[in-house]
Amino acid sequence: MASEAQNERAGSRQPRPFDPARAGQLDDPARLTYLPPLDLLRLLDPPAGTAVLDFGAGTGTYAIALARLRPDLRIIAMDEQPQMLAHLKRKLAAADAPENVLPMLPAELESGGESFPRVLALNVLHELGDAVLRDLPRRLAPEGRILFVDWNAAAERPVGPPSEHVYRPGEALMRLRHLGYHAVLAGEFAYHYAVIASWTEPASGRLAAGSA
C-alpha cells in the first residue's frame, strides 16, 4: 500500500500529502480574502446548470463558497482523505449550509463515471504525481478545462508550503505541457497563480493514459 501511494506521488514537488491534523488551517477566513472565490468563479466560467469538480477539496471551504455564489451548479467536492471530508460533512450539516455540495471519495467519483465541463484543482498541483495528472483529463467533458490554482514559489508568503515545495508559474506551465496539457497562465493573486489547462490528446489517448 505504501509503495502504491509513493508511485501515485512520483513527480510531485511536495514529498508528503497535507496532514489532516492541520485541517483547521484550511478554514482560515483569511484565505477568502487573498484568494477570492468570486475571482476563481470568473476564471472557471462554468456553464449554467452544470457540475464543477473540486479536485482535492480539503475541508470544502471553497466548494461551499462557490456553491453559495452559484446555486445553479452542483459542486462535487472530492478528496482522498476521509478526515477532510468529515470536516466538510459537519459544515454541510449546518442549517444555513448550501444544498448543492456533494462530498466524495475518489472511489465514489470513479463509480459514478461522471465527466465535468470544469474542474478546479486548488493548491494541489505541487502534491499531485504525474500519473494522477495524466489521469485527470478522464474527468473532463468534451471541450472541458481545468483551473489549476496553486501557491507561487516566486511570491513572498506568510502562509503556505515552503517555496521549494511549490512552483513558479513558468515551472507549472512547463510541467503541465510536458504531461500533455495545453496550458496558459490566466492570472496571479497575492500568493497564487492560476493556469487554465485543457487536454491536447484525443479522447482515445485520454482513455489510454487513464488505463496505463
Image: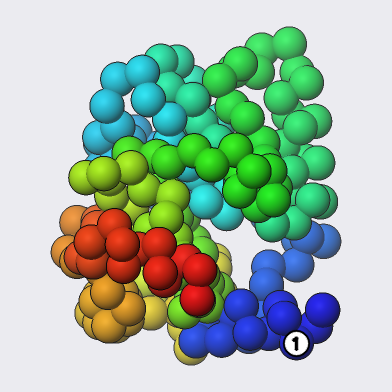
Quadrant of the image containing the N terminus? bottom right
**Of residues 106 and 125, which is closer to you in this image?**
106
Count residues near mark 1 (Cα–Cα under 10 Å), then give few for <14, some for 14-19, many for 20+.
few
Q: Residue at x 47, y 66 (%)?
A: 210
Residue 2 placed where, x, y %?
80, 83
Q: Residue at x 45, y 15 (%)?
A: 71
> Considering only vertical position in the picture, is 99 above or below 33?
above
The residue singled out by tag 1 in the image is 3
> Considering only vertical position in the picture, is 5 above or below 133?
below
> Considering only vertical position in the picture, is 74 above or below 87?
above
Colour setup of the view = rainbow
In the picture provided, is 94 more to the left or to the right than 79? right
> Considering only vertical position in the picture, is 23 above or below 30?
below
Residue 64 placed where, x, y %?
56, 30
**Of residues 203 and 131, which is closer to you in this image?**
203
In the picture provided, is 13 more to the left or to the right than 105? left
Residue type highlighted by circle 1: Ser
